[in-house]
Image (tube, rainbow, N blue to C red):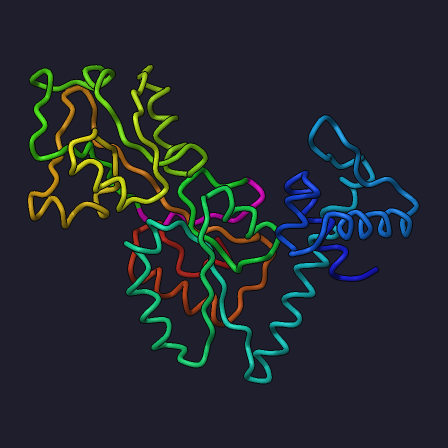
Amino acid sequence: MEFYTLKTFILLAQNGSFSQTAKLLHLTQPAVSQQIKGLEAEFNQILFERKGKTTQLTPAGQLLLPYAQRISLLLSETINMMLEFKGEGEGLCIGAGTTTIIFRLPEIIRDFKLLSPGSELKIKVGTSKEITELVLNGSVDFGLVTTAPSDKLQSIPLYRDEILLVTPVLWYPPFTPLRFSDLEETPLILFSQGSGFRDFLDAFFRAHNFQAKVVLELDNIEGIKQMVKSGLGLSFLPKIAVVNELGTKDLLTLKLADLDSLYRTTYLISLPDKLWTKRMMEFYSLLHAQFSSPNFPQDPTNY
């Protein structure tokens, strides 16, 4: 049994797509199929079955998956520990969304480089769902996500962002005081569907029986701000992302009479059985110093 074959098996089990697995591994789809066939021949068991357009684990595959994940994780940790022992540690790899990277991580990354000048730091960008998958398959050491974490992962709440209703300077509310329901005919500019922040807003809208009139969807927060400035619509955005524009009066924010403040939590996620490296602990100590709260654990390995 080869290590790379187990990694292929784990990825396919997580995403249910031969083509997506091949893309993630930079392989052809036939190469992925050949690896899975070889693994099935080795165990003399069918591990996957096709159901419609997706591929699902058979009972034998479900039995194998947790063992494959533990073997993969243990081997990766063994390699990293031996490299650290030689003074050649692999460094640190984290995953986060664009907004988190731009507005929350620059100072922490700077301090990490000062604390560990010889360590390599890699950052993978993606939605909360994509980052969660990267953590689950061991592609990153830990991730920062804004959706409810998987129950398969250890999660630590880091901080809360206040979400504001952001308006152009020359926008006038249809009613005063403005209520949430008064916005149903107002054009909104939001993140694209599938992003963690859009999922968060959609859940909020559903909870309040609100029918959003979405006229534009973008993947870039700077693009959304420019569209709002141009008067094309309103948006709901994290306060930290618009604090400069609010200070210069390039954008305005408006309280809704019938809603309390809206907040979104960012979590640090990692595999529960993962052995934290020295670099992970160093980066965590910087997060702890930046976002510490009464419930913030001093030792994340015992959380």
Q: Is residue 264 magenta?
A: no
- Give residue 200's position: percent from left, percent from top: 38, 32
Is the magenta region chiefly helix, strand or loop? strand
Relative horizontal placement of residue 188, taking residue 194 as reference (left or right): left
User: Where on the picture, by quarter, is residue 106?
Assistant: bottom left
Tell me which residue sits at (53%, 40%) in the image. Answer: 150
- Give residue 23's position: percent from left, percent from top: 63, 50
Compare residues 29 and 37 and report the one nearer the observer: 29
- Give residue 110's position: percent from left, percent from top: 32, 70
Tell me which residue sits at (55%, 40%) in the image. Answer: 151
**The magenta segment:** 151-159
Tell me which residue sits at (18%, 15%) in the image. Answer: 182
User: Where on the picture, by quarter, is residue 101?
Assistant: bottom left
Residue 292 against residue 195 in the figure, above or below: below
Tell me which residue sits at (31%, 17%) in the image. Answer: 210
Q: Is residue 158 magenta?
A: yes
Residue 292 against residue 157 in the figure, above or below: below
Compare residues 178 and 293 and report the one nearer the observer: 178
Residue 228 against residue 112 in the figure, above or below: above
- Give residue 172's position: percent from left, percent from top: 8, 24
Relative horizontal placement of residue 220, taking residue 11 as reference (left or right): left
- The quarter of the image holding the N terminus is bottom right
